[in-house]
Image (tube, rainbow, N blue to C red):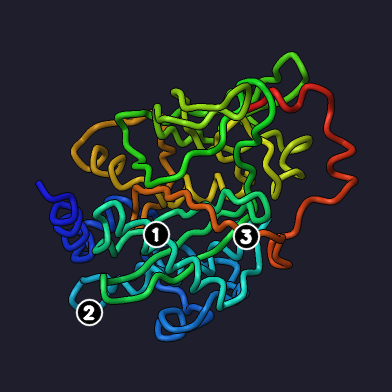
Amino acid sequence: MNPCIGINCRIVRRNRLRVESIGRAWFGAALFPLAFSIAQAAGAPNRDPAPPVDITASSVAAPDAAGLVDPHRALLLRALFARDVKRRLNVPATVQQEYGERLEAALEQNQLGSLAGEYIVLVDRNANVQALFIYFRPTPSDKWVMIGAAPVATGRPGEFDHFVTPLGVFEHTPDNMDFRAEGTMNQNGIRGYGKRDMRIFDLGWTQGERGWGKGGMSQMRFQMHATDPDKLEPLLGIRHSKGCVRIPASLNVFLDHYGILDAEYQALVESGQSLWVLHSDRQVTPWAGRYIVVVDSERKTRPAWSPAPGGKAEAKVPAGADTAD
């Protein structure tokens, strides 16, 4: 079956969710006056809006009088991102548009050019950028709009067992079931997956470029996860992992709590299955996605909007820290 056809069918079904369906997944249904209008959210670049303290996913996805949820309201999640994600990047409007175009090109190359109506994660692995973006567009005719951006750390070549983070479109599926960090330290005193209960987004086995020896390709387990909050999270913004995508703890919680990449997990829940990895208090929107796209912008210099960690952060890195995922 043409994947675009199947995806679009699912998107249409999700975008027509009635209030009864929303009630099964969300906690609280009261509307809250938002800090900016849907029209502003749909047409303006992300400028890190100051959100109300008690804004919720339920208020973002409030149904209209007919019980339908306007997909343009998905863009209002930017207020939640600005409130909940502590380490954010202030990306200029022109750059937001450039990355939206990169995302569109990558999807086109993978027969997903008509994808819309769901959140998607974009990572720039370039050594001078090291950033993650969340994007959304209501329909295939709309442009991709940035929800928010944060610093990451991708694979650093030059050391044994360190891969270059692979390029491409990766599907987040229960076929490679996620798990949660135990919060224990390795022999070097590093919590490689971060503090206890952080979610590891497992993307399965893939071909990765070896960053040691003579190079070449071999199998690597590709994951996106938090990292040691005290010793390694301050280094986000430079290549420092063994091939995975390290993200801030607050972004990990954001992706997890709002089900940004949980379309297929949520489908299992709605079919009656119980998944231990999913928290009972999560607030999944009708626009849950499933794709992580990795690109390389090939930038030759570091942009001001994506600063590298300072010398103080690097000086505090303990010996053996490079052995963590």
Q: Residue 162 lies in what quarter of the image? A: top right
Q: Position of residue 157 (x, y in %)?
A: 65, 33
Cα distance in 3D space between marks 3 and 2: 48 Å
Is 178 located above or below residue 37 in the figure? Answer: above
Q: Which one is in front, 286 or 148?
A: 148
Q: Position of residue 305 (x, y in %)?
A: 69, 67
Cα distance in 3D space between marks 1 and 3: 44 Å
Sequence-first disc among 2 and 1: 1
Q: Secondary structure at mark 3?
A: loop
Tell me which amino acid carries mark 2. Answer: Ala
Pointers 2 and 1 in contact (C-beta within 8 Å): no
Residue appearing at x 37%, y 48% in the figure: 291
- How crowded pointer 1 is (Cα within 10 Å; few <14, some 14-19, many 20+) is rated as few
Q: In the displayed image of the protein, which residue is found farthest to the top? A: 187
Tell me which amino acid carries mark 3. Answer: Arg
Residue at the spot of label 2: 65
Q: Residue 41 lies in what quarter of the image? A: bottom left
Q: Check residue 162 in the rendering and tell me which mark sits there, or answer none.
A: none
- How crowded pointer 2 is (Cα within 10 Å; few <14, some 14-19, many 20+) is rated as few
Residue at the spot of label 1: 28
Q: Which one is in front, 46 or 68?
A: 46
Q: Secondary structure at mark 1?
A: loop
Q: Relative to residue 238, is residue 219 drawn left or right? A: left
Q: Position of residue 92 (x, y in %)?
A: 61, 75
Q: Check residue 299 in the rendering and tell me which mark sits there, or answer none.
A: 3
